[in-house]
Structures are given as C-alpha cells and as structure tokens.
C-alpha cells in the first residue's frame, strides 16, 4: 500500500470539483451573489429616486411621512434571519474598487447593518429595498450620526432639508468601504 502526502487545499479543490453550484434565478438589479460558510449573500441595486419614509420621532407619537430623495443604494442581503446591510453609491458599482458610502438614513448602524427592529424583512432579496423604506424609521441619536457631511451629528436635519426635493446631493455622502470589502461581509 502506497501513501502520498497532499495538502488540505488539494483535497478541498478535488472535492469542490464534484460540487454542482447554481445561483438559481437572481433578482433584477443583482450586483453579485456569493455562497459562504454563513450562507448565501445577494447584493441588490436600487437607482437613485425619491422614497416615502415614515419617521417616528417619539415612540408615543404618530409617524410623520416624508418624501426624500436618496442616492443609489446597495443592499447586501444575507442568509435568512440575518439583518441586511445597506450602502449608498454615487453610481451603480462596476468594480470591486468602487466606493460605497454610509446610507443617509436612520435605522442603520455605523457598520451599515440595518437595525430591523420589529419589522419582518423578507427572505427574498428583491423585496428588501422596498421593505426597508416601508419600515418605520426611528429618530435615535446613535444611528443619526456620521451619515451626512452637512449635518454630521443628525441625519434628521438633512432629512428636513431634503423633504420634497428631487435629487440627493452626492457631495454630502461619507465613504465607508470599497465594493470588494462589502462582497466579503460575513466571511469568517
């Protein structure tokens, strides 16, 4: 009986050749798909547009509706049960080196992960962007800072300024990471 020493990488590559992988049908405007140890990730693009948001400034107060222009948005949707991420972009990303920016919105942690609160986000990545804007936004200090150059302490002041406007001022965006780093979110 003969034995031969092989590397773990060689074994992994040999086994990987036997795997059949398919993304299945991808949502419209999909930027990328990845399968990781943490599950699948799909990034969905939404063009710049005016969104209607519901802002709850106090828990015991009714929500106020605002019509806000937003830049293009990239939603990185992770495996079921994990909160998605959201980033702003000056244009649809074309390379891993393109810049992504903080989404100028409440309910987004400094890490760009969405605070889902009590809102149930769908498992279908194509529906996540609309559900993000269908959820109630909460005016909280921790998630209001660092999302606007003009109003670094409170994105709500930016919202007040933009309510009813037609376009988002792209020079107000604050960079956070490159597309290549966002593609690896959730990797171990």
Image (cartoon, rainbow, N blue to C red):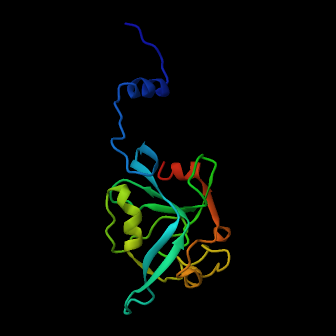
Query: Is 118 in front, or is 32?
Result: 32
Give the residue drawn at x 50%, y 60%. 47
Residue found at the very far top of the displayed protein: 1
Left or right of 31 on screen, residue 20 = left
Residue at point 42%, 50% (across, down) = 41
The N terminus lies in quadrant:
top left
- Residue nearest the viewer, comparing 158 with 91: 91
Residue 64, image x and y in percent? 42, 87
Nearest the eye: 177 or 2? 177
Q: Is residue 167 above or below residue 99?
A: below
Look at 50% across and 67% down and name the residue there. 49
167 or 127, which lies in front? 167
**Residue farthest to the front, as pictured:** 166
Which residue sits furthest bottom? 60
Note whether residue 141 is visible. yes
Q: Locate residue 83: give its quadrant.
A: bottom left
- Up-down: is 174 above or below 152? above
């Amino acid at each position: 009986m003969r034995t031969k020493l092989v590397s773990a990488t060689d074994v992994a590559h040999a086994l990987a050749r036997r795997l059949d992988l398919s993304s299945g049908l991808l949502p419209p405007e999909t930027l990328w798909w990845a399968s990781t140890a943490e599950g699948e990730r799909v990034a969905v693009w939404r063009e710049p547009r005016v969104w209607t948001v519901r802002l709850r400034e106090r828990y015991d107060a009714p929500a106020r509706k605002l019509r806000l222009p937003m830049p293009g948005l990239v939603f990185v949707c992770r495996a079921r049960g994990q909160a998605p991420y959201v980033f702003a972009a000056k244009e649809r990303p074309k390379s891993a080196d393109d810049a992504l920016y903080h989404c100028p919105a409440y309910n987004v942690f400094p890490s760009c992960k969405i605070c889902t609160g009590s809102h149930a986000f769908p498992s279908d990545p194509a529906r996540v962007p609309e559900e993000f804007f269908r959820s109630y936004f909460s005016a909280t200090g921790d998630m209001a800072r660092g999302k606007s150059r003009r109003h670094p302490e409170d994105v709500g002041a930016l919202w007040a300024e933009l309510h009813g406007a037609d376009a988002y001022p792209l020079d107000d965006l604050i960079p956070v990471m490159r597309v290549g780093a966002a593609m690896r979110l959730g990797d171990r």
